[in-house]
Image (cartoon, helix red, strand yellow):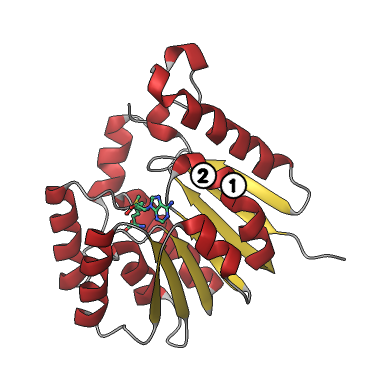
Amino acid sequence: MAIAEERVVTYIRSLETEECPMLEEMEREALENGVPIIKKETQSFLKTLISLQRPEKVLEIGTATGFSALLMCEYAPENCRLVTIENYEKRIIAARENFRRAGREEQISLIEGDALKVLRGLEGKFDLVFMDAAKAQYIHYLPEVLRLLEEGGVLVSDNVMQDGDVFESRFAVERRDRTIHARMREYLYEIKHNEALVTSILPLGDGVAVSVKRKES
Ligand SMILES: C[S@@+](CC[C@H](N)C(=O)[O-])C[C@H]1O[C@@H](n2cnc3c(N)ncnc32)[C@H](O)[C@@H]1O
């Protein structure tokens, strides 16, 4: 189920401009092969946010074949470093090859493994965290993400509307999706009520939440 009216989405998409040929090709391939990459509207949002914030350290949870990582690098300052996490072997191989073809092997570090385990072992601070992996795990990633986020840093969480399920009653959701439904609701409640964060939930793409980590005064 779409979360925004189709004709609104179609109109907004009609205004989008092309990316570099490699990103266009990667997007086409991903769509053909069923690789779940960020939607056009989310791409546009991330590009704008990155151009505004100019982050120097970005953490991405969920690389897939590297499309969003490369898109973010395209709009980030030249000295930006990006760390991205993926656990699916086939996608790791494709992402490494894409980072090499784009000449960004030095700029992007791909860490293989389960995101929660990897996050627990990470040190340092990030200006921007893009959360785009297993939706039911977001609530478990959050304490680690808060530890790794700079004060004033931004957390972008994708797919938070769970294809429109999240605002339905749990009984309207397929039984097999109820755990994700409950955990995503818990996650959204937490990022809206956690005193360390200021959060806005946007009905964009599959639903995007933008949170800023407050500066301690
Ligand atoms: C929505 S896709 C990421 C799309 C990518 N950010 C893009 O737009 O180009 C989510 C990815 O997270 C990965 N993933 C899911 N659970 C994971 C986990 N526990 N640890 C690491 N990666 C995980 C999946 O294999 C998948 O490739």
Snapshot quadrant of residue 89: bottom left
Residue type for callout 2: Gln
User: Which residue is identified by label 2?
Assistant: 137
User: Which residue is identified by label 1?
Assistant: 140
Q: Residue at x 78, y 49 (%)?
A: 195
Residue type for callout 1: His
Q: 49 or 97, which is in the foreground?
A: 97
Q: Is 66 left, or right, of 151 in this rendering?
A: left
Residue 129 in view of the camera: no
- Pick the quarter of the image with the C terminus: bottom right
Residue 113 in view of the camera: yes
Q: Is 215 left, or right, of 50 in this rendering?
A: right
Q: Is ligand 1 closer than 8 angstroms to the Cβ of mark 2?
A: yes
Q: How far apart are marks 1 and 2 (CA)?
A: 5 Å
Q: Is ligand 1 closer than 8 angstroms to the Cβ of mark 1?
A: no
For the residue labelled by badge 1, is the local secondary structure a helix, a strand or a loop?
helix
Snapshot quadrant of residue 164: top left
Give above or below for 146 relative to 136: below
Residue 203 in percent (x, y) is at 46, 38
- Pick the quarter of the image with the N terminus: top left
Q: 105 or 52, which is in the foreground?
A: 105
Q: CB under 8 Å between callouts 1 and 2?
A: yes
Q: Residue at x 33, y 68 (%)?
A: 71
Residue 149 in percent (x, y) is at 64, 66
Q: Residue at x 41, y 62 (%)?
A: 113
For this orientation, the residue located farthest to the top is 171
- Marker disc for residue 110: none
Residue 142 in percent (x, y) is at 62, 51
